[in-house]
Image: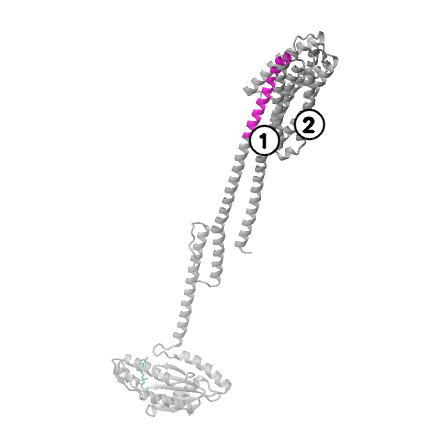
Amino acid sequence: MSLNRLFRLISIALLMLFLALAISLVWIEWSIYQNGANSVPALRNFRLGLVAMEKLSAERGPANAYMGSRPGERDALYQQLKAARVTSDTAMDQLRDALEKDPTLRQSPMFDRLRTVQQALGPARAAVDRIGLQPEDQRTTLYVVSAVNGMVDMIPVMVRLTAELASIVDQSDPDLRDGLAGVRAAASLREYAGQIGSRFTAPLIIHRKLNSDEVIEIGRLYGRIELLRSLVSAQLASYSKRPEFARAIDEMDKQYFDNGFQFLDYLLQVGLKSGDYGITPAELAARYVPQMKSILDLRDLLLDDMMVRAEQRNVQARNFLASVIGLTIIACLFFQLLMYMIRKRVVRPLVSATDLVVGLVDGKLDQEIPKGKYDDEIGGMMRALRVLKERILERNSLAKEREALITQLQTSSNTDFLTGLLNRRAFFSYGEQQMAVAQRYERDLSVVLFDIDYFKRINDSYGHLSGDAILRGVAQTASQLLRKVDVLARYGGEEFIVLLPESDLAQAQAVAEKLRAALAHKDFEIDGGQHIRISASFGVAALVDGRGLEQLIKLADTALYVAKEQGRNRVATSA
Ligand SMILES: Nc1nc2c(ncn2[C@@H]2O[C@H](COP(=O)(O)OP(=O)(O)OP(=O)(O)O)[C@@H](O)[C@H]2O)c(=O)[nH]1
């Protein structure tokens, strides 16, 4: 696999891994944000539930007052009761609307519970109305207690409903758990505080002492209230350092647990001894109910604080999510940029450097080696490659020069400098080869040795340079007349030799005659533009069994001597 492809695959794999991690991170933060976003509406619903329960409890005050009404105050107390009923109905309708708006809550048992409470309210209120309309002396403990219980009996359902709403808040934001428990404890405290007051309704209306059941119930409620007081203190331990909470707790202790309890203790003492309370249920409500407000104030303070915290956390979660998304995008872009840079500055140059090296090895010396754009290791490698290419080019050119030199040397060592013909050494080299072939295959072979006549005189008369010109002219003339297979050489001084393969003595003699005639009739131009004529004498010898090249030349030389002796400008053959 090529480096380029491998790098691309690794880049894609890393990007996928990176994206998977980034998406998981964003998904986690998105879930946290979504849950947090849920906590605010859940808290709002929880508050509506608590308010509905509180208003239902609060309705018991005017209801008890109405049940204990005297003829002159009945209408006024009924108006107060009606107003309280409108308030509790409004609170329950608001809760109902909120539950209806949310499809999951609409389908939940909470909705059914609320309906149950609303349905139960009708008969419970009717029972209250009946007693309120009865003459005072006809009101019995049984009916009054039953009417009071009718109003109290709906509360456990409301407690259950608010517990379910609290659990939704808890799931949305577990950090609100402490506050949630504190709020629930405060709401229950308010409820039991109300119930303990309601337990005095029947004795007050009938003007009697508390019966044993009522004493036991009031004792039980005292116990619960104390328990809830310690629970509220425990849950609010972390809050009590804050001045507004410390003030609210202080206010509750003073208003309810000091003043309210003092009043209840008084009623309890009277209820246990004489039953002569000296107040109506309306007066009880007017004195006792305001003291419970401090509990609700603490509850609302906690709820407000939870709402602020939930909103802050929601904003924090949203900001954090936005930061995570932003950072993820930046990290993705940075990763892409990093891969691009590595590819551009490392992988691609490395691949092209490899191609260049392979090309140099294959002899592609015309390829352009780019200059490295950056002063880094890759740039250094490109510079090194350029040096390497230059060295290879230098080495190649040196090798060519050397070959040319060797060829030139070979040529000059075989060539006569003046005439350009083969020299005596080269003639013997070729001659021996031809001789071996002729002897091996029994072929004809002849030698013609010729010498320019009176050459000394030419030198003496026209100068040495003219003599050289004559020698070049003779060589040129002889070369033109001979076959390609014939080997013409300068034998020495003004002496030339020709080796004639496939030629017997007669044929060689004819060649010699042709050469002699040509030389004798040619005008040779000498130094100074003057033309002169020359002649040459020829000795011819042919190969006979057993003779070597030197013997053949010797025979030709003897014949040449004869030609000279016989008057020159002639051809003589060996015997
Ligand atoms: N210009 C020139 N002269 C050369 C060269 N080589 C030999 N010679 C001359 O050739 C002459 C040869 O003279 P000789 O051997 O006396 O013979 P010749 O004068 O040709 O007389 P014959 O051969 O008897 O006809 C000498 O003077 C050499 O100096 C050469 O390369 N150039």
Which amino acid type corresponds to the residue marked 1 in the rendered image? Answer: Pro
Q: Quadrant of residue 279?
A: top right
Query: Can residue 82 be seen at all in this image of the molecule?
Result: yes
The answer to whether 100 appears left or right of 137 in the picture is left
Quadrant in the picture for residue 134: top right
Q: Quadrant of residue 81?
A: top right
Q: Which residue is mark 1?
A: 41
Q: Main secondary structure of the magenta part?
A: helix
Q: Which residues are magenta?
A: 282-311
Kindly identify the residue that appears in the image at 34 percent across and 88 percent down: 518
Tell which tag, 1 or 2, sits nearer the viewer.
Answer: 2
Name the residue type under label 2: Thr
- Numbered mark located on residue 116 in the image: 2
- Magenta span has 229? no
Q: Position of residue 329 (x, y in %)?
A: 51, 42
Q: Secondary structure at mark 2?
A: helix
Give how far apart the Cα atoms at labels 1 and 2 are. Answer: 24 Å
Q: Quadrant of the C terminus?
A: bottom left
Residue 463 vertical position relative to residue 14 in the rendered view, above or below: below
Within 8 Å: ligand 1 and the Cβ of disc 1?
Answer: no
